[in-house]
Amino acid sequence: MSNELAIRNEIKYELSVDEVIDHVKKVHNVMAKAMQADHHYGVIPGTNSRPTLLKPGAELICVMFRLGPRYRQETIREDNGHLTITCTCELWHTPTNTLQGEGMASCSTREKKYAWRQANRKCPNCGAETIFKSKQDPGWYCWTKKGGCGRQFHPDDPSITEQETGRVPNEDLAEYYNTVLKMASKRALIAAVLNVTAASDIFTQDLEDFAPEHVKEAPKEQPKQAAQEEPKSKLKRITKDNLAQFIAAAGPHYEANGWGTREELEEHIDKISVGLGYPHEFLNWSQQQVNHLVEEMKVYRAKRESEKEEREQIDGLKQPLAEVEG
């Protein structure tokens, strides 16, 4: 009883201005010294928004302020199999067992990434979704390099042409029930951490589970002048005969724009070609294989450019954080 009374006597009903400033400094310091980009927080490429707080970052802030989460869930189950969970996360101060605040969030299988799936043509023979239109012949084929059986089909085969493709309703909603529960809890935790610790001036709400869509749809910033001026290639069409020349010209361009070294680019190309089982010599490649590698190089370049932008944004954050520490 005496210990409980002592704890109650230490409880403050408001903070002083200096204590609030120290509180803000703590959040800045833990971000600068203990958090890692893309793990504790993330930055959406092509935007100037605040970093998004991720679940590991929220847990780290809870450790610093000695906050313990407690959850309440409300569940709505529909007859068609859809599930919606609304979660409330309470944050309790562990030493004093006092409620500091809460956050609320929800998740549902009606969200498009759970409610829909991309249906591809299945092979009637092996059942794999590896049916592709042949570029040489008018028919269809089951691509062995994608895990298919290699069987070929007539262009008008109803077992292929009558299949439903594109976005279709997801029949296996139950497989996402646990994911929806975890996602609602995670969103509520991060909302509670932002509310209780007043970290919203540093972080925004967690967008980890929406990041892929936002990255695709976010308006791109105008690239810097060096990145705008692509070296004009004299190659009108990339083929197996000039692929090596194209890669050799791309290496210095990647280095000039800070997208990595030419050795890293060549190593990435080797991993792709070996992983897909392509012939060792470019001259033995098909045009389809050449086109696929060129597209992979574009994806690789976009990824490295995004990583460069993130590093620059993080470097920009560190400067004001250093001033706060001082």
Image (cartoon, grey):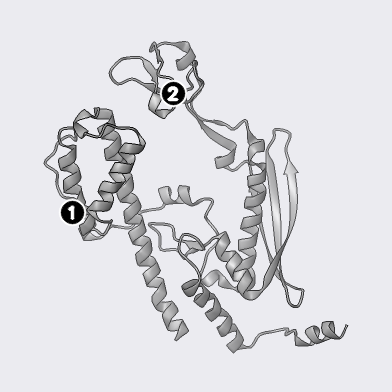
Residue at image coords 39%, 10%: 154
Helix, strand or loop at disc 2?
A: loop
Q: Residue 180 placed where, x, y %?
A: 64, 46
Residue at image coords 64%, 71%: 196
For the residues bearing labels 1 and 2, Cβ distance under 8 angstroms: no
**In the visual, does 284 lie left or right of 126?**
left
Residue 124's label in the rendered image is none
Q: Residue 213 placed where, x, y %?
A: 47, 47
**In the visual, does 175 lie left or right of 287?**
right
**In the visual, does 245 lie left or right of 14?**
left
For the residue marked with disc 2, what is the amino acid? Gly
For the residue marked with disc 1, what is the amino acid? Pro
Q: Residue 189 placed where, x, y %?
A: 64, 61
Residue 106 in view: no
Quarter of the figure that contains the C terminus: bottom left
Judging depth in this view, the residue of 22 and 287 nearest the camera is 287
Residue designated by label 1: 252
- The image shows residue 271, relative to residue 165, as above or below, that is below
Residue designated by label 2: 148
| Label 1 – label 2 distance at C-alpha | 38 Å
Residue 317 in view: yes
For marks 1 and 2 on the same chain, the one whose residue lies earlier in the sequence? 2
Which quadrant of the structure image shows residue 12? bottom right
Residue at image coords 33%, 40%: 272
Residue placed farthest to the right in the image?
A: 1
Q: Residue 4 placed where, x, y %?
A: 83, 82
